[in-house]
Image (cartoon, rainbow, N blue to C red):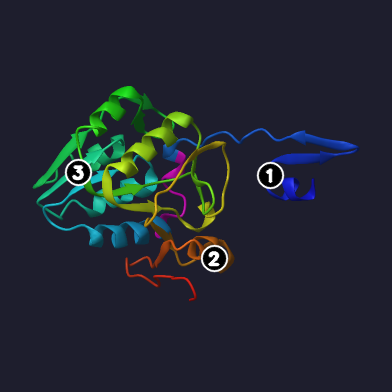
C-alpha cells in the first residue's frame, strides 16, 4: 500500500485504501505556457536534426508546436501532422509542404485521432517523427489521456525511421493517465537541463539515447549507459 500510494495509484485510508481517479486533462491553451524555456530548447535542438528535403511527422501538443515554429525556415521540407497548431505554424511557411492527416478533432489536445488519421498513415512513411507526451516512462512508454491517442502514436512510430519524444523534466516518470503507447528500440528522449538524474537513469539503463537540451538548443547531453 505504501508503494501504491507513492505511485499515486491509491489513497490510504483508515483500515484500507481507495482508488485515486485520474486527474483531469489540461487543455492545450493552458499547457502552452508551461515550461516555456524548456520547450523552446527542446524544439531548437530537434529542429537542428531535420535535414532539408526530409519528410517528417509531427504530433499534436505544445512541445511539438514549438518545434513547428522552428521549422519555418528549414526548407524544402514536407511535414505531416496530427496537430492543428502545427498546421497554423507552418501553413504559410515558404518551401514547407504541409500534409494534415485529418480524423476526429480533440479540442483538449488540439489534435486529430481515429480511423481516418490511422488510414492516412498507412499511405506514408517518414524520415523522423517527433512526439509529445503527457508523461513518459522507461518501462511503459508514452502516457496519454485516451487509448485513441496512444494507438495513433504507435502507428506514427511504426512509419518513421527515427523516433523522438519531446518531454520536459516534469514529465519523466509521470503517469497521470492509464493509456500507454509502447516505444520501439532505438528511440531518442529529448528533455531539458532540469531533468533529475534519478528520473533519467531508468531510460539510460534501457539503452535509450537521452538528450538534455539547453534553452539555446545546444545539448548538455547525450546521456549514455555508464555515464
User: Element under label 2?
Assistant: helix
Residues in magenta?
30-37
Q: Provide residue 127's location: percent of width, then percent of height.
A: 21, 50
Q: Give the residue displayed 49% in from the left and 75% down from the top.
A: 226
Q: Provide residue 140's location: percent of width, then percent of height.
A: 53, 47
User: Element under label 1?
Assistant: loop
Q: Give the residue displayed 24% in from the left and 54% down from the top.
A: 70
Tell me the number on the disc at residue 8.
1
Q: Measure the C-alpha gap from mark 1 to mark 3.
A: 38 Å
Is 215 located above or below residue 226 in the figure? above
Tell me the number on the disc at residue 181.
none
Give the left or right position of residue 21, taking residue 200 as reference. right
First reached walking from the N terminus: tag 1 or tag 3 = 1
Q: Give the residue displayed 45% in from the left and 63% down from the top.
A: 207
Give the left or right position of residue 91, taking residue 24 as reference. left
Q: Nearer the viewer, mark 3 or mark 2?
A: 2
- As drawn, the residue found furthest toward the bottom would be 227
Q: Is residue 32 magenta?
A: yes
Which residue in the structure is indicated by mark 3?
A: 79
Name the quadrant of the N terminus.
Answer: top right
Q: Measure the C-alpha gap from mark 3 to mark 2.
A: 32 Å
Q: Provide residue 25's location: percent of width, then percent of height.
A: 52, 35
Instruction: Report if the CB atoms under discs 3 and 2 are less than 8 Å apart.
Output: no
First reached walking from the N terminus: tag 1 or tag 2 = 1
Which residue in the structure is indicated by mark 2?
A: 201
Quarter location, residue 208: bottom left
Q: Provide residue 31's location: percent of width, then percent of height.
A: 45, 43
Q: Measure the C-alpha gap from mark 1 to mark 2.
A: 21 Å
First reached walking from the N terminus: tag 3 or tag 2 = 3
Label 1 crowd bin: few (<14), some (14–19), many (20+), radius 10 Å: some
Amino acid at each position: 500500500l505504501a508503494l501504491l500510494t507513492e505511485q499515486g495509484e491509491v489513497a490510504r485510508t483508515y483500515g484500507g485504501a481507495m482508488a485515486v481517479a485520474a486527474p483531469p486533462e489540461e487543455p492545450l491553451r493552458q499547457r502552452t505556457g508551461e515550461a516555456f524555456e524548456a520547450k523552446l530548447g527542446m524544439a531548437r535542438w530537434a529542429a537542428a536534426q531535420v535535414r532539408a528535403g526530409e519528410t517528417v511527422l509531427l504530433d499534436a501538443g505544445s512541445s511539438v508546436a514549438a518545434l513547428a515554429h522552428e521549422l519555418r525556415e528549414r526548407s524544402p521540407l514536407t511535414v505531416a501532422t496530427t496537430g492543428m497548431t502545427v498546421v497554423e505554424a507552418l501553413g504559410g511557411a515558404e518551401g514547407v509542404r504541409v500534409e494534415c492527416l485529418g480524423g476526429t478533432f480533440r479540442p483538449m489536445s488540439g489534435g486529430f485521432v481515429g480511423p481516418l488519421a490511422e488510414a492516412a498513415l498507412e499511405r506514408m512513411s517518414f524520415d523522423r517523427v517527433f512526439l509529445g507526451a503527457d508523461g513518459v516512462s522507461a518501462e511503459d512508454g508514452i502516457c496519454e489521456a485516451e487509448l485513441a491517442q496512444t494507438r495513433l502514436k504507435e502507428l506514427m512510430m511504426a512509419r518513421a525511421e527515427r523516433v523522438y519524444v519531446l518531454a520536459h523534466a516534469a514529465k519523466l516518470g509521470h503517469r497521470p493517465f492509464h493509456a500507454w503507447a509502447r516505444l520501439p528500440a532505438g528511440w531518442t528522449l529529448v528533455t531539458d537541463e532540469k531533468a533529475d538524474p534519478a528520473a533519467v537513469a531508468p531510460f539510460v539503463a534501457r539503452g535509450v539515447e537521452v538528450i538534455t537540451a539547453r534553452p539555446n538548443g545546444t545539448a548538455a547531453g547525450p546521456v549514455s549507459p555508464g555515464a
